[in-house]
Image: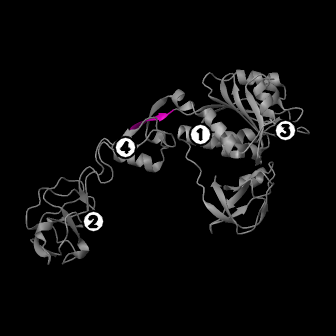
Amino acid sequence: MPESAVSGSAERRSVAEHAEAVRSMLAGLPAAKGSERLPLMAALGRALAVDVVAPGHLPPFANSQMDGYAVRSADLPDGGARLRVAAPIPAGIAPPELLPGTAAPIMTGAMMPRGADAVVPIERAVPDRFPEPGADAVVELPATPAGSYVRPAGSDIAAGALAFAAGTTLGPGQLGLLAALGITEVDVRRPLQVLLVTTGDEVVEPGTELPPGKIHDANGTLLEAAMLQAGLLVTRSAISSDDPAVLRGLLRGRSAGTELIVTTGGVSKGAYEVVRQAMAEEPVQFLSVAMQPGGPQGIGTFDGVPFLGFPGNPVSCLVSFEMFLRPALSAVLGTPAPRPAPRARLTESLSSPAGKHQVRRASLLPDGRVRLEGGPGSHLVHALASANALVHVPADVTELEAGAEVEVWML
């Protein structure tokens, strides 16, 4: 067994230390991944590969913020004035110049005419309604400073300004801005390609009959779904037996584009820990993280490919993904977006083991409180399925009363 694996087997880390180790291991991936150009909707949830600069002003022209009258502010002294009503300006046309002594009915978003520098809202006009089309009308308007209710060209973003930096995750708001700027395609980082392997002689595929002592594989579905949600390209191998040679064969049969290997199970200190055995000649550390659930972890490389070994209990493997891999992807690749992390008050008391960061499944309620779902056990899949959040209990906290404030990660 290599020295790194020997030293790693006795190591114990804090949650923060292991999270940083995972982030550091993945830090070189963006440069190697390259990019691809996609239409806007296909880029939803992806991270920009390059900076995007605004090709033009937004809005592209000065326009009215209100339904009202476009005016020359110089025509409205302190006491206001009566002005002749000019032709109306609907949205979507290029209006003629506004002549001195006139006021043009203008709709919200319509282009300001040359010569006009302010808008008087219709509610401030006398009469407070627009005249019939073609009517020879006058309107009484109050004094109005230049710039009132006018959206200047480029007031949202100016041409040449940075719209988004490389690494920005593209959600609906970001795609909307790109569309408003007239952009139809963007360069995004290619998704990370992951090989996911479930291990264990006791595990069989869902849909098959359960012989005595066997369980259906929940981990593969849990993690593949979480990874797909996070924007990864996932290849799931067949379930590996507890034969180290079989597992090594599965890993070496991976596709050439694999950039990360994740396994579940076989990382503890038992007699049949297949992942530990299969990695005996690889620079992989197996260690204990001060976390419940999900303490046993593996990290290193297999044939030069970054490797993470998660525990085998279903809740432990998903918590490991949420605590270590997902945040590292957010930090290094720019996607997925970090989990919302509000603070909420517990509906009940809880206990947590000394020296361990406990992660409990919970539901954030409409009243802003958070209710625990099930106990701390790492096998409670039903409780996990009932939850919409994770509650964090720091390692230096052993008891919390009902009403105590906690950090919550929304799932």
Of labels 2 and 1, earlier in sequence is: 2
Percent of width and height locating residue 9: 80, 33
CA–CA distance between discs 3 and 2? 68 Å
Percent of width and height locating residue 94: 18, 52
Pointer 3 local density, CA inside 10 Å: few below 14, some 14–19, many at least 20 = few
Q: Is residue 275 above or below residue 383?
A: above
Pointer 1 local density, CA inside 10 Å: few below 14, some 14–19, many at least 20 = many
Q: Indicate left or right for 282 with 152 as reference.
A: right
Q: Amino acid at mark 1?
A: Leu
* Residue 66, numbered label: 2
Do callouts 4 and 2 mark residues in contact (Cβ within 8 Å)? no
Of labels 3 and 2, earlier in sequence is: 2
Under circle 4, the secondary element is strand
Classify residue 112 by image quadrant: bottom left
Of labels 4 and 2, earlier in sequence is: 2
Please name the predominant secondary structure of the magenta segment in the image. Answer: strand
Front residue of 392 and 259: 392
Residue at the right extreme of this rendering = 212
Q: Amino acid at mark 3?
A: Glu
Q: Which residue is mark 1?
A: 329
Under circle 1, the secondary element is helix
* Residue 379, numbered label: none
The stretch in magenta equals 184-189
Of labels 4 and 1, earlier in sequence is: 4
CA–CA distance between discs 1 and 3? 37 Å
Does the image show residue 206? no
Q: Is residue 136 above or below residue 220?
A: below
Q: Give the number of the mark in front: 4 or 3.
A: 4
Q: How is the image coloured?
A: one colour
CA–CA distance between discs 4 and 1? 24 Å
Q: Give the number of the mark in front: 1 or 3.
A: 1
